Image (spheres, rainbow, N blue to C red):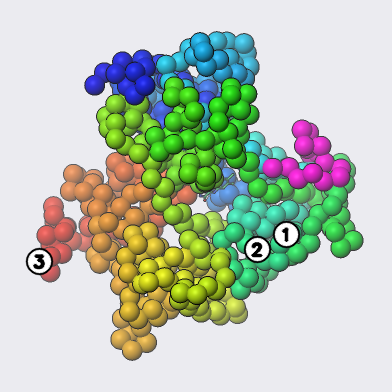
Amino acid sequence: MTTEETVDGSGNRFVIVGHGMAGARLAAELAARLGDAKITILGAELHRAYNRIMLSSLLAGKVDEAGVELAEAAGHGIDVRPGVAVTAVDRANRTVTTGQGDLIGYDHLVLATGGQALVPPLSGLDRERLPDRVAVFRTLDDCRRILAAAAGARRALVLGGGLLGLEAARGLAARGLDVHVVHPVGHLMERQLDPTAGAVLARTLGGLGVTTHLDVAATAVDAQPDGVALTLSDGRVLDADLLVLSCGVRPDTALARAAGLAVDRGVVVDDRLRTSDRHISAIGDCAQHAGTVTGLVAPAWEQARVLAQLLAGHDPRARYRPQPPVTRLKAAGIDLAAMGDAAAGPAPDVEELSFSDPVRGTYARLRIVGERLTGAIMLGDNPAVGTVIQIFDRGTPVPLDRRTLLLGRSRDAGAPAPVESPALMPDAATVCQCNTVRKGALVACWRAGARSLPEMVAATRATTGCGSCRDAVEGILGWLSSIDTPDPVEAEVAA
Ligand SMILES: Cc1cc2nc3c(=O)[nH]c(=O)nc-3n(C[C@H](O)[C@H](O)[C@H](O)COP(=O)(O)OP(=O)(O)OC[C@H]3O[C@@H](n4cnc5c(N)ncnc54)[C@H](O)[C@@H]3O)c2cc1C
């Protein structure tokens, strides 16, 4: 099928608004499928697309700026325009207007405008112009601001005890700062954790130099050139050298709304990622599919893949089908995975199992309905975390002896959890959550000749999201190398 025959009967001019993780992936996927397409990608940020997820690692000093580059950000003959914001969409004439006043025509337009960090309405804070010692945590520039303020600082405040707030807090603590997290809810990460897990996490953080102040709101900020003070609803005033605001993300829908597209919390899209205008799609953090805005990279990249299939005309039946997400905290010294409805309270017909060892910072909780895992929290040293994620991902029945999931092994049998070893892992097990790379794809890659981690990564993109699967991919590579045969699966069967 030629580009002229793409969905919507449109031509081959694709304009993507937003050079973030979703936009960059879509451009690469389109370029790989349509050699003759004219792809223009416009990004308001001055930088080419980077791995936003890795900003937490940059803040913690685990990687430098080169370490947050995205492979997709370069090449492919794509017309990339950093520092160019789109200010208006003319749907009748199918053009977009840039901040520089340029008019660019499109056959198909894709909105990948992401989300913006929320600035809470606090006395003393001007949302449009944050003081030097106050920053949100969304972009590379935000990260640079935080690091500049952290240099020579002794104490930092983080407002918001959600996932990003805690990653920022842990990163700053790793740089030697005394960090205080203020959270308006009674326990940390309440969207993913139950109160017991929140308490175990707070205790672990305490041991890492992060003090938490729970169930208390901030009411005012007083930022001066030499420090910042945060007034709390209980009358206390906390002083610090810098304040990081981590109070949530709002999908960036301004452009879509002004263009008259259907917008709810995000830009409303169907299973084909189409907006209310069939010549315009939306993907990533700005999109709302089936009532949900995700704020995670795995769905954004899956949406990019499905949309590229459709726009290229390679698979007109491709549809976006959301997968239940697994949330992982990327903070040194804290292993946390949460999935499904784990934060929900007890309910009839729900089998609840938990294990708690607050002194060692370990907590595990499983929610099971009719032999299926509907949610889990695995905090601290939980040997079965990989197994639990796989069972959740694939919707397979839980083992009869639930202790293998809670404790990693059965006391009677002394047997390890069923699928921790690469050899025992089924081919359908998802190894890289961000890119949905299964073990079978890595084995296929080996069969095709890949013998090193970079070759595996180049072929499958595994490890290029949050990077937490790197050890697992290396484990599979090591296992394949140890078998040392062109067909490891046959060798496994023979053994
Ligand atoms: C510190 C941090 C850690 C994270 N960790 C994880 C994690 O561990 N796992 C996970 O799944 N997700 C994580 N996320 C979320 C993840 O980064 C997002 O889900 C992902 O970046 C979404 O991609 P996107 O392209 O939709 O949006 P973005 O990456 O935000 O990109 C949108 C881009 O569009 C640009 N833009 C907006 N409007 C316009 C316009 N009018 N014209 C031109 N350009 C425009 C913006 O400037 C931006 O560059 C994290 C986010 C942060 C900030």
Q: Nearer the viewer, mark 2 or mark 3?
A: 2
Which one is earlier in the sequence, the residue at label 2 or at label 3?
2
Q: Residue furthest front?
A: 348
Q: Is residue 206 left or right of residue 98?
A: right
Q: Main secondary structure of the magenta part?
A: loop
Q: Residue at x 63, y 41 (%)?
A: 250
Residues at circles 2 and 3 in contact by the CB criterion of under 8 Å: no
Quarter assignment of residue 121? top right
Quickly name the residue at label 3: 494
Residue 183 is tagged as 1
Q: CA distance from mark 3 to mark 1?
A: 56 Å
Bounds of the magenta span? 118-132
Residues at circles 1 and 2 in contact by the CB criterion of under 8 Å: yes
How far across and how far down the image is residue 100, in percent?
62, 13
Quickly name the residue at label 2: 188
Q: Is residue 430 left or right of residue 231?
A: left
Q: CA distance from mark 1 to mark 2?
A: 7 Å
Q: Tag 2's secondary structure? A: loop
How far across and how far down the image is residue 33, in percent?
30, 27
